[in-house]
Image (spheres, rainbow, N blue to C red):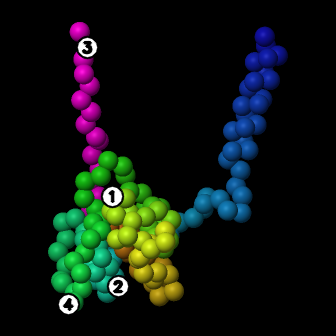
Amino acid sequence: MLREMLGLLSITFFLLATGCTRTASSPAGFRLPDGDAANGRMAFLYMQCHQCHTVAGEEFPEIPHADPPYVELGGTVSKVKTYGELVTAIINPSHELAAGYAAEIVSENGESNMYNYNGYMTVQELTDLVVFLQPHYNVVTPKYDYRIYP
């Protein structure tokens, strides 16, 4: 019994140790510089993100001759919008298309309609945008009504 227990512990330790190994594609050690929310709001306007997006609790000037914004950012959600998810949504918008919107509105042939700013946006602008957007998400726990049977 002791031999089996030691064998099981050895295998468990091996699996845990190999699961923690860093590889060349590991995100371990990745950290962007701190951002500034006020500068993020200015970047949002400068890049005309408000042409297609609204932000919960924010008012933006209208863009002449543009369709009204159709993808809301922020608001009440049931899942935390992480820093990494927001960075990914900005630099790789086709990775995950906006949920809850008709595909023809947000994409064409499976690719996001969002303009790719990667060649123009600085890292600081990216971090500022994320720091501006993140507090606009209000995470709530979904309410479930459980029926109690007698």
Query: Mark 4: few, some, or many residues within 10 Å (few <14, many ≥20)?
Result: few
Residue indicated by mark 3: 149
> Which amino acid lies under the numbered mark 4 shown in the image of this protein?
Pro
Tell me the SS state at disc 2. loop
What is the three-letter code of the residue carrying label 3? Answer: Tyr
Is residue 134 at least partly visible in the picture?
no
Residue wearing tag 1: 100
Query: Of circles 1 and 2, which is in front?
Result: 1
| Above or below: residue 145 compared with residue 138 | above
Element carrying mark 3: loop
> Could you tell me which residue is drawn at 29 percent across and 58 percent down?
137
The stretch in magenta equals 136-150
Give yes or no for contact between labels 1 and 4 (Cβ–Cβ under 8 Å): no
Mark 1 or mark 4, which has the lower sequence index? Answer: 4
From the viewer's perspective, is residue 145 above or below residue 103?
A: above
Asked whether 139 falls inside the magenta stretch, the response is yes
Q: Which residue is mark 2?
A: 47
Q: Secondary structure at mark 1?
A: loop
Among numbered discs 3 and 2, the one appearing first in the sequence: 2
Q: Amino acid at mark 2?
A: Met
Using the numbered discs, state the Cα–Cα distance from disc 3 to disc 4 in whole angstroms.
58 Å
- Residue 74 shows in this picture: yes
Q: Secondary structure at mark 4?
A: loop
